[in-house]
Image (spheres, rainbow, N blue to C red):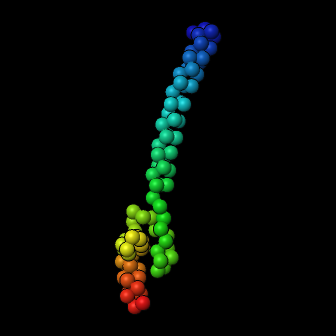
Amino acid sequence: MGPLRIVILLFLFYILYRLVAPAAGKNNKGAGKRQRDSDVRDILEEDPVCHVYIPRRQAITLKKGAETVYFCSHACRQHFLDATREK
């Protein structure tokens, strides 16, 4: 195998690598972006009792008139209900 063939083969492998490598990188970047977007959609709410921030999807809710109050646990929700009944 002559030196010219080796150079041509190396050049062809390089071109193939450049065509395949960016496509694999784009797929990984897109997956990370989708993951970040889904993380941003969930809003943090503050528990009025213990002042802990909790994602809305995981929070325990209480409808109070037109307002929704979010709690980190059933104990905090019960404490809030007890405190509002005493007033």
Q: Tell which residue pokes out farthest to the bottom in this image.
A: 86
Total numbered badges shown on the rendered structure: 0
At horizontal 51% and vertical 27% (from top left) the residue drawn is 20
In the rendered view of the protein, which quadrant contains the N terminus?
top right
Q: Residue 18: name its quadrant.
A: top right
At horizontal 56% and vertical 17% (from top left) the residue drawn is 12
Which one is in front, 11 or 44?
A: 44
Q: Residue 72: name its quadrant.
A: bottom left
Could you say where residue 5 lies in the image, as x and y percent from the top left? Answer: 59, 10
In the rendered view of the protein, which quadrant contains the C terminus?
bottom left
Could you say where residue 34 lies in the image, as x and y percent from the top left? Answer: 47, 46
Visible residue check, residue 60 = no
- Relative to 47, residue 16 above or below: above
Could you say where residue 29 lies in the image, as x and y percent from the top left? Answer: 52, 41
On screen, residue 1 versus residue 31, left or right, reads right
Visible residue check, residue 84 = yes
Which one is in front, 59 or 85?
A: 85
Could you say where residue 25 lies in the image, as x and y percent from the top left? Answer: 53, 36
At horizontal 47% and vertical 61% (from top left) the residue drawn is 43
Which one is in front, 23 or 13?
A: 23
- Relative to 34, residue 76 above or below: below
At horizontal 37% and vertical 74% (from top left) the residue drawn is 65
Which one is in front, 30 or 79?
A: 79
On screen, residue 73 versus residue 2, left or right, reads left
